[in-house]
């Protein structure tokens, strides 16, 4: 099957990155979207964008996966048609877009998956929009090695088909981890797509192509097929645990159909409900990057639970791999199920009973039943020994021999139990649980932040005429000594072996990822301070005391500093870059004319 519409697009931009980005940021959308045609192509070019550049800022492509009696699952449509997917990626999408046959998902089902992007395929328009990434919270930044797949699967009886069932999935493939947002988009367009087919999908994609860019911190109005979705993407400057769409409390706007208070959060309480007695232990396992399997009855439950686990250590980023829905056909199946080496640091969500046997050697397994609607408290599962997980019909439970480092906080359990008894809405329960996890994570991370900040050299040691000083080395034992007076006991009432938890954490991928990010940020801060120190110097006085060769060398070094500051988004004061350009121009004008010509040609200032 093929869609009518565009042939493959050419290069992703006519001009340099900043021109495209500026055009994307300035793009202003009407609330009512006109039909696609030549006018929009002309309008797009006038904004400095090619057709599909706007679409690519949000989605890589849209796929339709159907079931063929001879071939099995098959990608029937990829839209836009020029979208690039390798055969391996298509195979992964095919198998991950359908529930396992044992799930018995009748009707409509929504879930999410995540898969590796093939190497060599990682250059795209996303590179042009990566500057938005710097303003995102670390846990929402794109991972260049992975795609997300957001699925709307329909399975209904149809006697006219040989198989007796209509089975099809509409799948949005994106780099963006905006789970709640993309599930909302699918709810709006998928049911109608199954009725109206390809022209409807083409029209929906044209709507997405006219959306403003996903700029963090801006309130965005996103029209799609007659519906306007209002969202705000968080920024790294937001106070953790707060929702920034204040318009929710103001007068309703008649043009707005859907207002989303979050783009990425899942229903945390609903996911943790069967295991909330053990939520603190699960927080520890996720924090430490332990191998973890979620065995669930359907892809919806498995993907929601895995995403809830990953989010429970926010604002820390979970730095290992995680697969909200994983099947035996996945290209990493052998890698992740081998018994020849220890299980990797990864969280897998599975539904196939075959995994009960295949992953029996994994140290931590959560088996959950059907997630109950809000207001119903399922029987709390118990922590059981792994040796009891032998049969396919094992009861729900947390199967592990792990002994938590921290004592269980009984207060949060009482608070959530009381909420269930009082029929408190699931959203309110989720807010309580999310705040609890946030405070626990912050209590844990603040001592590390405080110690790492002490590794920064004093500002007075930064000389404009020497290279920026080096950061001091992170010494685990030195850090441990700081915990006696400035440990988590300052902000948390939870008792236990915090030191043991820190020792374990320092060996984990999450510490490695967090520390690399902080080290990079502090190194860039040193470079920015060094740049600011240079700007405060009287450089014209300096060149009077030095030779022409030394002056030319200084100009070239200053130009390199400018390029680096722009490329690495150094945190410099707004006027610093302009001051530096003024200094460079003044120094060049003080040189002989022949040198001026050469230096003016060597890059732009």
Image (tube, rainbow, N blue to C red):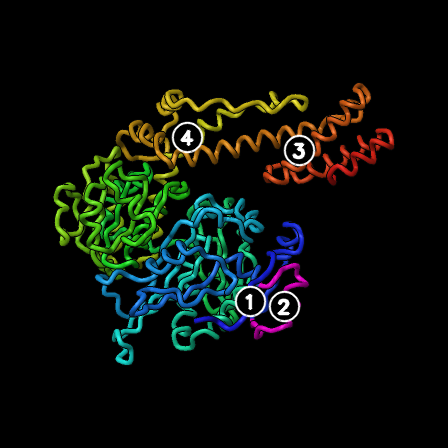
CA distance separating discs 1 and 3: 43 Å
Upstream in sequence: badge 1 or badge 3? 1
* Part of the protein shown in magenta: 32-51
Q: CA distance from mark 2 to mark 4?
A: 52 Å
Q: Which residue is mark 4?
A: 448
- The answer for how far apart the CA atoms under marks 3 and 4 are is 31 Å
Q: Residue at x 65, y 67 (%)?
A: 43
Q: Secondary structure at mark 1?
A: loop
Q: Which residue is mark 2?
A: 41
Q: Work out whether residue 243 or residue 582 is closer to the camera in this orientation and state it.
A: 582
Q: Is residue 163 above or below residue 539?
A: below
First in residue order: circle 1 vs circle 4: 1
Q: For residue 429, say whether it is visible.
A: no
Residue 445 in percent (x, y) is at 39, 34
Where is residue 351, by image quadrant? bottom left
Expressed as whole percent of the image width and height from the top left, the position of residue 433 reads: 32, 48
Q: Are marks 3 and 4 in contact (CB under 8 Å)?
A: no
Task: Identify which residue is drawn at 23% across, 49% down.
Answer: 275
Report the Cα–Cα distance between label 3 and label 2.
39 Å
Q: Residue at x 66, y 33 (%)?
A: 561
Would you call the spot at circle 3 few (<14 residues within 10 Å), some (14-19), or many (20 or more)?
some
In the image, taking residue 301 as reference, residue 581 lies left or right, namely right
Q: From where the camera sits, is residue 187 visible?
A: yes
Q: Which residue is mark 1?
A: 7
Task: From the image, tell me which residue sits under label 3.
Answer: 561
Against 380, is 443 above or below?
A: above
């Amino acid at each position: 099957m093929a869609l009518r519409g565009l042939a493959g697009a050419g290069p992703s931009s006519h001009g340099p990155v900043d021109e495209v980005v500026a055009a994307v940021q300035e793009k202003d959308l009407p609330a009512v979207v006109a039909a696609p045609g030549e006018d929009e192509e002309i309008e797009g070019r006038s904004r400095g964008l090619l057709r599909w550049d706007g679409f690519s800022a949000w989605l890589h492509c849209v796929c339709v996966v159907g079931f063929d009696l001879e071939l099995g699952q098959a990608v029937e449509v990829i839209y836009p048609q020029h979208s690039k997917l390798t055969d391996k990626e298509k195979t992964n999408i095919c198998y991950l877009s359908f529930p396992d046959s044992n799930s018995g998902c009748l009707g409509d089902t929504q879930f999410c998956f995540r898969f590796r992007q093939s190497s060599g395929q990682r250059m795209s328009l996303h590179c042009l929009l990566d500057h938005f990434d710097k303003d995102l919270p670390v846990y929402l930044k794109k991972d260049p090695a992975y795609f997300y797949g957001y699925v709307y699967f329909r399975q209904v009886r149809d006697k006219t088909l040989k198989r007796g069932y209509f089975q099809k999935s509409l799948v949005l493939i994106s780099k963006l981890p905006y789970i709640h947002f993309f599930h909302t988009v699918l709810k709006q367009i998928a049911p109608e797509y199954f009725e109206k087919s390809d022209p409807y999908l083409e029209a929906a994609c044209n709507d997405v192509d006219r959306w403003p860019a996903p700029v963090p911190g801006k309130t965005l109005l996103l029209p799609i097929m007659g519906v306007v979705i209002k969202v705000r993407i968080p920024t790294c400057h937001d106070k953790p645990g707060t929702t920034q769409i204040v318009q929710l409390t103001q007068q309703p706007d008649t043009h707005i159909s859907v207002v989303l208070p979050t783009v990425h959060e899942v229903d945390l309480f609903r996911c943790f409900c069967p295991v909330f007695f053990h939520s603190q232990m699960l927080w520890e396992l996720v924090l430490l990057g332990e191998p973890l399997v979620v065995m669930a009855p359907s892809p919806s439950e498995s993907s929601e639970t895995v995403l809830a686990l990953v989010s429970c250590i926010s604002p820390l980023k979970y730095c290992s791999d995680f697969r909200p829905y994983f099947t035996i056909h996945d290209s990493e199946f052998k890698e992740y199920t081998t018994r020849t080496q220890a299980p990797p640091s990864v969280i897998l969500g599975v539904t196939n009973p075959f995994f009960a046997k295949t992953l029996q050697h994994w140290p931590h397994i959560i088996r959950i039943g059907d997630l109950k609607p809000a207001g119903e408290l399922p029987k709390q599962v118990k922590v059981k020994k792994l040796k009891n997980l032998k049969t396919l019909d094992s009861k729900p439970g947390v199967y592990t021999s792990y002994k938590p480092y921290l004592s269980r906080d009984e207060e949060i359990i009482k608070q959530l139990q009381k909420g269930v008894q009082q029929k408190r809405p699931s959203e309110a329960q989720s807010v309580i649980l999310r705040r609890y996890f946030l405070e626990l994570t912050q209590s844990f991370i603040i001592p590390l932040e405080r110690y790492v900040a002490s590794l920064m050299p004093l500002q007075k040691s930064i000389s404009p005429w020497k290279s920026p000083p080096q950061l001091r080395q992170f010494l685990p034992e030195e850090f441990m000594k700081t915990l006696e007076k400035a440990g988590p006991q300052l902000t948390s009432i939870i008792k236990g072996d915090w030191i043991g938890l820190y020792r374990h954490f320092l060996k984990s991928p999450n510490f490695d990822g967090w520390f690399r990010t902080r080290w990079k940020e502090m190194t860039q801060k040193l470079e920015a301070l060094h740049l600011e120190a240079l700007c405060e110097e009287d450089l014209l006085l300096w060149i009077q005391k030095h030779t022409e060769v030394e002056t030319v060398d200084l100009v070239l070094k200053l130009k390199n500093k400018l390029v680096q500051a722009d490329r690495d988004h150094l945190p410099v004061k707004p006027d610093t870059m302009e001051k530096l350009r003024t200094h460079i121009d003044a120094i060049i004008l003080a040189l002989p004319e022949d040198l001026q010509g050469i230096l003016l040609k060597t890059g732009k200032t």
